[in-house]
Image (cartoon, grey):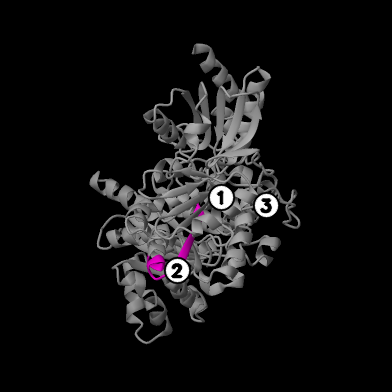
Amino acid sequence: MLERIGSPADLQALTPAELDELAAEIRGFLVDTVSRTGGHLGPNLGVVELTMGIHRVFESPRDSIVFDTGHQSYVHKLLTGRQDFSTLRKRGGLAGYPSREESDHDIVENSHASTAVSWAAGIARGHTLRGEEDRCTVAVIGDGALTGGMAWEALNGLAGSRDRVVIVVNDNGRSYAPTIGGLARKLDGIRVDRRYESFLGWGKRTFAGRGRFRNFAYRSVMHGKRALKGLLQEPSIFADLGLKYVGPVDGHNIAHIEHALAQARDYGEPVIVHVLTEKGRGYTPAEQHVADRFHAVGKIHPETGLPIEPSRFGWTSVFADEIVKVAEERPDVVALTAAMLAPVGLQPLADRYPSRVIDVGIAEQHAVTSAAGLAFAGMHPVVAVYATFLNRAFDQVLMDVALHGAGVTFMLDRAGITGDDGPSHNGMWDMALLRHVPGLRLAAPRDEPSLRRAFREALDVSDAPTVVRYPKGAVAAPLPAVRSVGDLDVLASYGGDASVVVMGLGSMAGTAVSVAEKLAAEGLDVLAASATWVHPVPGGLLELISGAELVVTVEDGLTDAGIGEEWAAFARLAGARAQWSHHGVPREFLQHASRAQVIDRIGLDPSAIADTALAALARD
């Protein structure tokens, strides 16, 4: 069946039985392929029928379909002619999120959540202004992404408009973990209402017999005291904004989905279609794994869902262990995250001290400002998020935390180059952005001992924001200092007084040691060094580089305006004469590939850095 689908148009001629067969085949395809490549399995298993229904009712790409977030777009890729998943999220293969380079059917590449309704509002208004009233715009947003404030700003802006927007709320009760907050409780009330099944049956008959959504809305009101009226009035959270609402709809019944979407499409104004789906549907290991329904997986055994290669002890695990130890000692420590309790390592703390962990949903701005409030109230909040997601709350870090001298610690997981998740997930912007925040102190630990130590030192700062950043994946072997110069640790030294000093920040400390080894093999006197606290400029820098001809900095953040450039500017102002060579991430969006492949492409491998250093010395 799947081989017969080259475009969404090929879905139109399929019978109901064939549609069910195709849905089953798609699920089998996803389990088979994603288990070999890794990727977002659970979300896509849950939207098979929903995506098929969307593509049968709407005419993509003339009708724009925006996914929020893009990790639920695998089925969309399959139905739009992209069926080679053998290199999913690998260099040169399919991206793990929508990609305009891949298809005209893809609109939004950014996989940061809660943005789709704003995109849809802008696209739809553009169509209206151009006189293209026959085009419709669809935003597919999960109930988890509706916890983000930006989504509600967009819904508020859509209220009262006459643009053709259909907002599909894919309600599976989960983001990474169960969706939290007042919205989740509101949707829960609809999802478990015993009147739901009778509504589905009545709705099908109504849709079949009426050609306009206006009639559907009118009849729901005119049913007076009947149970249906109560059910349709339940989502007052949408009605109070002036938005039409349809639902809830069984997200695994294609006929019901099509009826609801067709009525919403033809209404001609913004409509919310509330669809109930089950994350991980049709895959037994996912259905039995309550924790995350196999949200994202590495390579797994498809029969059992067990990983082929068990993950090694990683940076996240170190933080998870240390914050529990700290919480036992300090009752003032409280943690916050944005819908990523397990991924950032806060689940053990939540299990031990549930009242001291706050999951705000996909709302990083709220997390940061409420952390400032907690600090004012005498607590020491720890905000744990992926580095890429703190970009969304930069203003709050600057104006709510730093301006008010709040003692808030930010633990930035997945900092630096992450690789296969693609451009929106590389945590490469944080150091260049955050070093401009007055009073902020930033640490980039290089190994497990320095991470544990940096975290505790950050918690001792009560009058300014502190940031500790660390990469994705396994922790490197410990890199003990052979000696220290001020706040800098010398990791390796070759020869006498060093003519070359190689500085490795954070996870790049090991690279600095390898570069030093290569330069020493060329007969140079060289040392490799690192600092745990990299901003402000660490004490001892001028002393360490006093006799050097060349200072090389290596960081996995932006080279422009990065930490290396900050150190060099400081040294030059102090009269240091050494030349500097900076190595980091270029100011560009990095396409998906493995971390090693990205490092090789941008010249952050030891051989390339050593060659550049030798060339600089030769020119001098």
Residue at image position (58%, 57%) is 343
Residue under circle 2?
379
Marks 1/2 in contact by CB < 8 Å: the verdict is no
* Residue 349, horizontal then vertical, whole percent: 59, 67
Q: Earlier in the sequence, mark 2 or mark 3?
A: 3
Three-letter amino acid code at disc 2?
Met
Q: CA distance from mark 2 to mark 3?
A: 45 Å
Which of labels 2 and 3 is toward the front? 2
Is 375 contained in the magenta span? yes
Residue 529 image offset from top left, x and y in percent: 58, 35
Mark 1 closeness class: few <14, some 14–19, many ≥20 residues within 10 Å: many
Total marks shown come to 3
* Secondary structure category for the residue under label 2: loop
Element assignment for label 1: helix
Is 251 positioned to the left or the right of 523 in the image?
Answer: left
Who's the residue at 45% across and 68% down the image? Answer: 379
| Res. 356 in view | yes
Q: Is residue 501 magenta?
A: no
**Which residue does the numbered mark 3 point to in the structure image?**
31
Q: Residue furthest bottom?
A: 225
* Kind of residue at badge 3: Val
Q: Which residues are magenta?
A: 373-386
Q: Considering depth in this image, is 426 or 404 the residue closer to the camera?
A: 404
Please give the label number shown on residue 75: 1
Judge whether 46 appears above or below 491 on screen. Answer: below
Element under disc 3: helix
Q: Choose mark 1 or mark 3, whichever is in front.
A: 3
Q: Is the residue 25 above or below the residue 485 in the image?
A: below
